[in-house]
């Protein structure tokens, strides 16, 4: 059975649900029916486990790409080793010639969005700050893009990656999709996307609030945001260097505070 050759590996809370649905519409891409399989986050994988994982792609047919989207994959080990066991497992089971798509968000906003998500689903209370949240939730850890990149480019050549920004997805989703497809050497089939809801968010915070019957989400004070901007300065600079784009708005604490004000 064929193995996946395309991964949306991260970052969490950066528009991966939207990108997943966009790519699933392309006639040359088969995406697993369920997003976030989280298969390679598991330790001690066996051949039987892998065979069951491949069942997610059994109906792919003769398409060019078989893919899945698990935004928690883009991470690195917390032990200071500079490795990513997740990336190493992926390389071991799928090989190193697959294509890896990353969509990165302002690391400060990504962390804040992660806190909001966990608050809405009852995993955090207002009394637990973003700096006190359980490490397993990855609120801060998953925003350390520079560290994760160094770990992932040990088993994978940098040329296997296609890196994009959440900002572009939010403002120009159709253009962003064209860029992703070009990186995969695929055309943009107008007919396939004629009725696609490009402007519809697929994981909207207000929709989640309604489903979970949450009436309000607290905002974040200036001290918290300034501390996060300082914490992720190296990661912001890393994204600027990688993309060749200046991103001063990623350091604008006032703008971020307004974007993450209390919701009622």
Image (tube, rainbow, N blue to C red):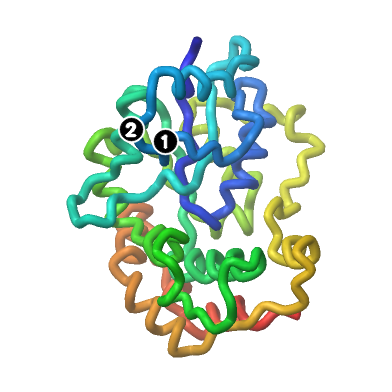
Q: Earlier in the sequence, mark 2 or mark 1?
A: 1
Tag 2 residue: 89
Name the element at disc 2. helix
16 vs 45, nearest the viewer: 45
Q: Which mark is residue 225?
A: none
Q: Is residue 164 visible?
A: no
Tag 1 residue: 40
Which picture quadrant has residue 134?
bottom left
Residue 98: x %, y % from top left: 40, 26
Residue appearing at x 29%, y 35% in the figure: 88
- Judge the density around disc 2: few (<14), some (14-19), many (≥20) Cα neighbours within 10 Å: some
Residue appearing at x 68%, y 27% in the figure: 189
Quarter of the rendering occupied by the C terminus: bottom right
Indicate left or right for 116 with 137 as reference.
right
Decide: is 256 above or below 154.
below
Name the element at disc 1. helix
């Amino acid at each position: 059975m064929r193995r996946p050759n395309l991964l949306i590996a991260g970052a969490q809370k950066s528009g991966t649900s939207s990108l997943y649905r966009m790519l699933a519409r392309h006639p040359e891409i088969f995406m697993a029916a369920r997003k976030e399989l989280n298969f390679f986050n598991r330790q001690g994988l066996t051949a039987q486990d892998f065979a069951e994982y491949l069942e997610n792609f059994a109906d792919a047919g003769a398409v060019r790409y078989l893919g899945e989207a698990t935004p928690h994959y883009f991470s690195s080990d917390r032990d200071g080793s500079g490795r990513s066991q997740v990336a190493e497992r992926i390389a071991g089971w799928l090989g190193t010639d697959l294509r890896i798509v990353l969509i990165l968000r302002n690391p400060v906003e990504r962390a804040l969005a992660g806190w909001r998500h966990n608050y809405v689903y009852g995993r955090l209370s207002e009394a637990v700050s973003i700096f006190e949240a359980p490490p397993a939730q990855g609120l801060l850890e998953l925003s350390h893009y520079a560290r994760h990149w160094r770990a992932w480019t040990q088993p994978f050549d940098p040329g296997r990656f296609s890196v994009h920004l959440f900002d572009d997805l939010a403002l120009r989703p159709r253009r962003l999709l064209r860029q992703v497809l070009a990186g995969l050497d695929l055309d943009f089939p107008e007919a396939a996307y004629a009725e696609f809801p490009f402007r519809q968010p697929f994981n909207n915070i207000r929709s989640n609030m309604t489903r979970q019957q949450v009436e309000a989400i607290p905002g974040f004070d200036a001290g918290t945001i300034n501390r996060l901007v300082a914490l992720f300065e190296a990661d912001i600079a890393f994204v600027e260097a990688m993309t060749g784009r200046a991103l001063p708005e990623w350091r604008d604490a006032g703008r971020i505070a307004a974007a993450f004000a209390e919701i009622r």
